[in-house]
Amino acid sequence: MNAIKFYIMPKSATSGSDALLDVVCQIIARHYDQGERVFVLAGDQAQAEALDERLWQFEPQAFVAHNLVGEGPRGGAPVELGWELGQGRRQTLIHLQANVAANHQQYQQVIDFVPADDAGKEQARERYKVYRRLGVMPQTEPFQI
């Protein structure tokens, strides 16, 4: 059974906001720095491309090797960004979609988010309930820099 963690976002990090994308990039970098192979399941292609662009803006000493699905080296970089289900050949899924990923069990851990806005909170509650029904007890913690 995989581990599920929900990060409770600060007030500025509402669904689809730049602040939420900034937090997601920080979390991607944390997992990359720990040597994990990460798949980021963005809400849509535009969000995946926005994350890609943000990651390229990191300072050289904080570089995160990443690519959009279908780009980059064979097998992908350590961090792969997509908007459709990944192959599950990575340790960590960073999840940004409204519904639980159908293949979430293929990952050792799933990172999810509770945005600050009411609609985002409600979607996160529904995902939390789905995980519970599947027998997984998600952890929650406030995001801290």
Image (cartoon, rainbow, N blue to C red):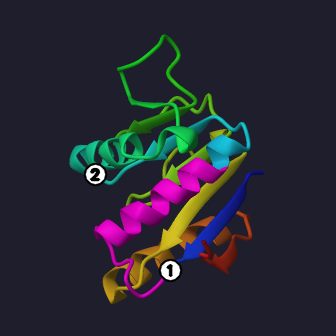
Q: Residue furthest right?
A: 1
In what element is the residue under mark 1? helix
Name the one closer to the observer, 131 or 53: 53
Can the viewer see residue 44? yes
Q: Which mark is residue 96?
A: none
Which residue in the rendered view is the most extreme toward the top? Answer: 74
Which residue is pictured at 67% across the width and 78% down the height? 141
Q: Would you identify the image quadrant in which residue 19 lies?
A: bottom left
* Quarter of the figure with the C terminus: bottom right
Asked if residue 23 is among those painted magenta in the image, a careful observer would answer yes
What residue did someone put label 2 on? Answer: 47
Q: Please, is residue 51 above or below residue 137 in the view? A: above
Mark 2: give few (<14), some (14-19) or many (20+) Cα within 10 Å: some
Residue 105 in sight from this viewpoint: no
As for residue 106 lying within the magenta part, the answer is no
Give residue 125's mark: 1
Give the residues drawn in magenta, as a range: 10-30
Is tag 1's residue or tag 2's residue first in the polypeptide sequence?
2
Give how far across and how far down residue 83 sits, in percent: 34, 42
